């Protein structure tokens, strides 16, 4: 399979990681319980974080980067998937998110842990808890033939993210010592948020 002429016209404009990010920022956040492959993202002009990461990886592949995604895994919250790239020896990321602080990262980070930790203070749930706990090794989408065009492969890729090795970010003592997220940070991160796509954690038992 290959890109159609009208798709290529859009893809040609996505000539840098930042331009890919701008495209993702220009389309609505999908609150639907379904996956879209990159072709479907282009057609429907909407995506959630997983769709956006796979789309970004596919577009990064078009401009010479390997199509790599990383799953940042959380407790009492949704995970967040990002597409990563490396430029001049440093890591950056492209991402679609319902939260303002969980999107693009300039290629400034020496390793993946540094990159992931740059998301920490913007990664919280609606109970004002910092929720990020670990991240996966990068998953190279090249192993999934025609992933750019196949909606059914998206679920396979999503499941694979649950089975690959992870790196934990904190010790149990560090987690217990975390403070609540302040109200100003919460409000800043939710500029433009669609509440229909927000995860609300179950109330803790007293």
Image (cartoon, rainbow, N blue to C red):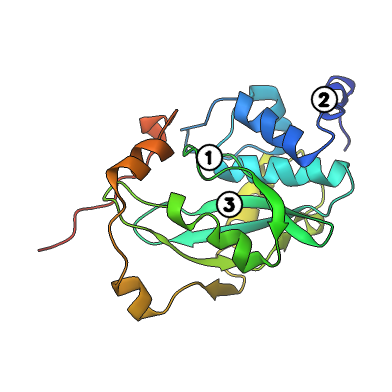
N-terminal label among 3 and 1 = 3
The residue depicted at 29 percent of the width and 49 percent of the height is 182
Looking at the rendered structure, the secondary structure element under dot 3 is strand
Q: Earlier in the sequence, mark 2 or mark 3?
A: 2
Q: Nearer the viewer, residue 187 or 93?
A: 187
**Total number of numbered discs in the rendering:** 3
What residue does disc 2 label? 7
Q: Label 1: few (<14), some or many (≥20) within 10 Å? A: many
The correct choice, above or below, for 40 with respect to 50 in the image is above
Q: Is residue 156 visible?
A: no
Secondary structure at numbered mark 2 = helix
Q: Position of residue 65 (x, y in %)?
A: 84, 51
The CA span between labels 3 and 1 is 9 Å
Residue displayed at 58% across by 69% down: 163
Dot 3 surroundings within 10 Å: few (below 14), some, or many (20 or more)? many
Would you say 164 lies left or right of 6 here? Answer: left
Q: Is residue 64 left or right of residue 115?
A: right
**Residue 21, position in %: x, y?**
68, 36
What residue is pinned by disc 3? 81
Q: Quadrant of the N terminus?
A: top right
Residue under pointer 1:
97
Residue 16 percent across, percent down from the top left: 81, 38
Nearer mark to the viewer, of 1 and 2: 1
Task: Between residue 133 and residue 43, name the one nearer to us.
Answer: 133
Q: Are marks 1 and 2 in contact (CB under 8 Å)?
A: no
Q: CA distance from mark 1 to mark 2?
A: 23 Å
Q: Is residue 33 shown to the viewer in this render?
A: yes
Residue drawn 68% across and 45% down?
54
């Amino acid at each position: 399979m290959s890109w159609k002429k009208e798709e290529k016209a859009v893809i040609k404009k996505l000539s840098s990681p930042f331009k890919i990010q701008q495209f993702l920022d220009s389309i609505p956040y999908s609150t639907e319980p379904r996956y879209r492959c990159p072709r479907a993202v282009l057609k429907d002009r909407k995506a959630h974080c997983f769709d956006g990461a796979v789309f970004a990886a596919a577009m990064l592949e078009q401009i010479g980067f390997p199509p790599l995604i990383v799953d940042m895994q959380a407790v009492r919250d949704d995970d967040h998937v990002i597409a990563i790239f490396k430029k001049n020896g440093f890591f950056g990321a492209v991402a679609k998110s319902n939260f303002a602080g969980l999107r693009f990262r300039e290629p400034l980070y020496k390793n993946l842990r540094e990159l992931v930790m740059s998301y920490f203070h913007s990664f919280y749930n609606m109970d004002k808890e910092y929720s990020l706990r670990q991240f996966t090794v990068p998953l190279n989408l090249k192993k999934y033939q025609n992933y750019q065009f196949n909606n059914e492969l998206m679920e396979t890729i999503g499941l694979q993210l649950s089975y690959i090795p992870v790196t934990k970010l904190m010790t149990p003592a560090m987690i217990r010592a975390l403070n609540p997220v302040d109200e100003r940070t919460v409000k800043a991160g939710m500029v433009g948020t669609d509440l229909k796509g927000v995860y609300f954690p179950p109330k803790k038992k007293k």
